[in-house]
Amino acid sequence: LWKEVAQIMGKKDEKKLALEIIKNMVSSMSTIPALDVADKMNEEITPLLVSEGIWKGYGALQFNRQYSIGCGKRSAITISFATSKDSRMSMQIQRDKYLTNRLMDRLSIPGAPWENIESENHLKQIFGNYKKPVVIKPTAFTGGRGVHTKITKLEEAIEAYKNIVNITVERNSKSKIIIQEQIEGEDYRILTVNGKLQAATKRVPAFVEGDGEKTIKELIEETNKDPRRDINNPTHTLKPIKIDKPLVDFLQE
C-alpha cells in the first residue's frame, strides 16, 4: 500500500511515509495489537469518524484514530487502550492520582500514606509526618511527568514542589500536587481483561553504562540512536532518555 501511495505522491522514502501514515491513523502502539487480533479473528474493522483535513489538528487526529471493531451489538469502539466498553467515570478516576487514592482509601485498599499539598507552607508542616523517602508528584499528568522520587530532605521536597508548580503553570493545568511515601521494589504494569490477567510488563528505568571514555551525555546520545527508541515510529517499544532537570539533579547528587 505505501509503495503505491509513495509512487502517487512522488516520495522516495517509502518506509518513512508508511510510518507517517500509521502515526496519523493509530493513537498509540497499544492500538496496533488490538487491531491485529481483531483482523485475525475476521472481525470487521471500520474507521469510525473521518474528518476532513485528516493531517491537520489534534482534534482531527483523535477522530481519525477511532475504530469500530465488529458489527451490531457485539461491536466496540477503540482508541489507544480505551474502548466504548469502559466506564467513562472509571477512566477519569484512574487518570487522576488524587481521585484514585481517595477511592482506594474509601474501599480500604492498602496503599502508601499520602496527602494533598495545599501550599509550600503546608508542605513544611506535614513533611515530618512521612517516613522517608517520599514521592512528590502532580495528580493529573501521565507517563511520569513531574514525578520526583527518593526525597529525604525538606529542601529537596520544596524544590520538587516548586518544579511541579512551574510545570502546571506551563501546561495551564489545575493538577493537584501530592506527597506520598515511596515503596521500594520492581515496577510492573498489569493488563487485565474481564478480571483476568492477560499480560504483565516489567518496567526498567532507563540507564547507561560507562566505558571510561565517553561522557554521560555522549552515552545517552548513543543509546538514543537505538531504533526502538524512535517515538516517530508508532511501534516503538522504548522511549529516548531525556536530559532534563530531574536527571541533572540526580547526577549532581
Image (cartoon, helix red, strand yellow):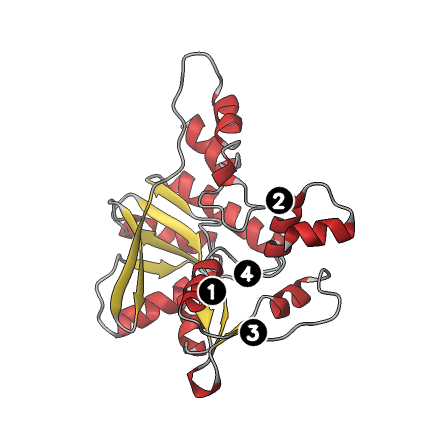
Q: Which residue is mark 3?
A: 46
**Image: 44 above or below 188:** below
Quarter placement of the C terminus: top left
Quarter placement of the N terminus: bottom right
- Estimate the spatial distance between the alpha carbons at disc 2 and disc 4, rounded to whole Å: 19 Å
**Observer-nearest residue: 201 or 24?**
24
Instruction: Identify the amino acid type marked 1.
Output: Leu
Left or right relative to 191: residue 88? right
Residue with the most extreme bottom position? 73
Marks 1 and 3, the one that precedes in the sequence: 1
Marks 2 and 3, the one that precedes in the sequence: 2
Instruction: Identify the amino acid type marked 4.
Output: Ser
Q: Are marks 4 and 1 in contact (CB under 8 Å)?
A: no
**Observer-nearest residue: 124 or 61?**
61
Spot occupied by residue 32 in the image (x, y as percentages of width and height): 48, 59
Q: Are marks 2 and 3 in contact (CB under 8 Å)?
A: no
Q: Which residue is mark 2?
A: 15
Disc 1 crowd rating (10 Å Cα; few below 14, some 14-19, many 20+) is some
Report helix, strand or loop for mark 4.
loop
Disc 3 crowd rating (10 Å Cα; few below 14, some 14-19, many 20+) is few
Q: Which residue is mark 1?
A: 35
Marks 4 and 3, the one that precedes in the sequence: 4
The residue under the point 43% across, 52% down is 137
Can the viewer see residue 126 in this picture?
Answer: no
Quadrant assignment, res 195: bottom left
Report helix, strand or loop for mark 3.
strand
Report helix, strand or loop for mark 2.
helix
- Estimate the spatial distance between the alpha carbons at disc 4 and disc 3, rounded to whole Å: 15 Å
- Estimate the spatial distance between the alpha carbons at disc 4 and disc 1, rounded to whole Å: 12 Å
Q: Which residue is mark 4?
A: 27
